[in-house]
Amino acid sequence: MKANKISIIVTVLSTTAFLLLSFLLVYCIDTNSNNKEFISLMVNISIGAFASSLLALIISLINYFSLRKNYISEYVTMINCFSILFRPYYNLYLENSNRNIEVEDFYIQQWFDYLLSNLHKPTNQLYFFFEKNKTQKIIDETNKILTDIYIGAIKVLEAKSKYNFELISLSDYDQVKIKFFNSINESGNIPTVNILTDNFDKIIKINKLSYIHRFDYKDL
C-alpha cells in the first residue's frame, strides 16, 4: 500500500502538471507564431502525457483500495481469531474463583504464540492517506490493547522461567500473573474482549466488509 500511496501522489502531480501545460500551450501561446508546428507537437505530447498519467492514476487508485480492503480484512480476521482464543478463559477467570495454574499457563502461552505470529503482519502493510481517519483510530486502539496483552504475556512467561529455575517463589510468580489478569480485565470499565469485538464490528461497518462474519468461540 505504501508504494500505491506514493504512486497516487506522483500521478496526481504529473496529471495536474500536464493538464496545466496543455491549457497553457493551447490558450496562452500565440499559435500564429513561427513556432506553430512545434507548439502543436508540444500540445499533442502534453495531452498524451496527461492521458497516460490519468490512466496510471486510475490504476494506482484501484490497486490502493483493493489492497486496503484486503489488509483490513486480514486485520479484522486476526482480531476475531484472537477474541476466540481470548474469551473462553477470560470468562472463566471472571466467573470462577477456583484458579487452575496449568490452565492459566496454557492460555497465556496460546495468547503469546498467536500474537507473536500475527500481531505485526497486517498493520505493517496499512498506509492510510489520512492518519486521523476513523479506521486508523480504531486500529491504533486495538493495537494498544493487543500489545499490552502481548507484553503482559511476555512478563508472565519470563516469571514462569524464573520459577522453573527456582529463582523466584511460586507466590512471586503468581503475583505476576494476577497483575497481568487484572490489567486485562477491564479497560475504561469495559471488558477488554468486548472492546475487541466492538472494534471488529466498527471496522466492518466503516469499511463495508459485510462479507466477513464475526465468529464466536461458541460457533466452533
Image (cartoon, grey):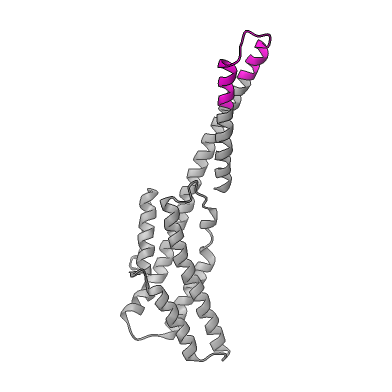
The quarter of the displayed image where residue 13 is located = top right
Q: Residue furthest left?
A: 95
Give left or right: position of 8 versus 177.
right
Residue occupying the point 68% across, 12% down:
35
Q: Nearer the viewer, residue 215 or 75?
A: 75
Relative to 164, residue 92 above or below: above
* Magenta-colored span: 18-43
Residue 89: % across, % down: 38, 76
Residue 119: % across, % down: 51, 63
Residue 157 visible? The answer is yes
In magenta segment, residue 215:
no
Residue 213 visible? The answer is no
Residue occupying the point 41% across, 71% down:
86
The quarter of the displayed image where residue 77 is located = bottom left
Residue 166: % across, % down: 56, 91
Residue occupying the point 53% across, 66% down:
117
Relative to 166, residue 83 above or below: above
Residue 106: % across, % down: 46, 79
Give left or right: position of 7 versus 172.
right
Relative to 194, residue 91 above or below: below
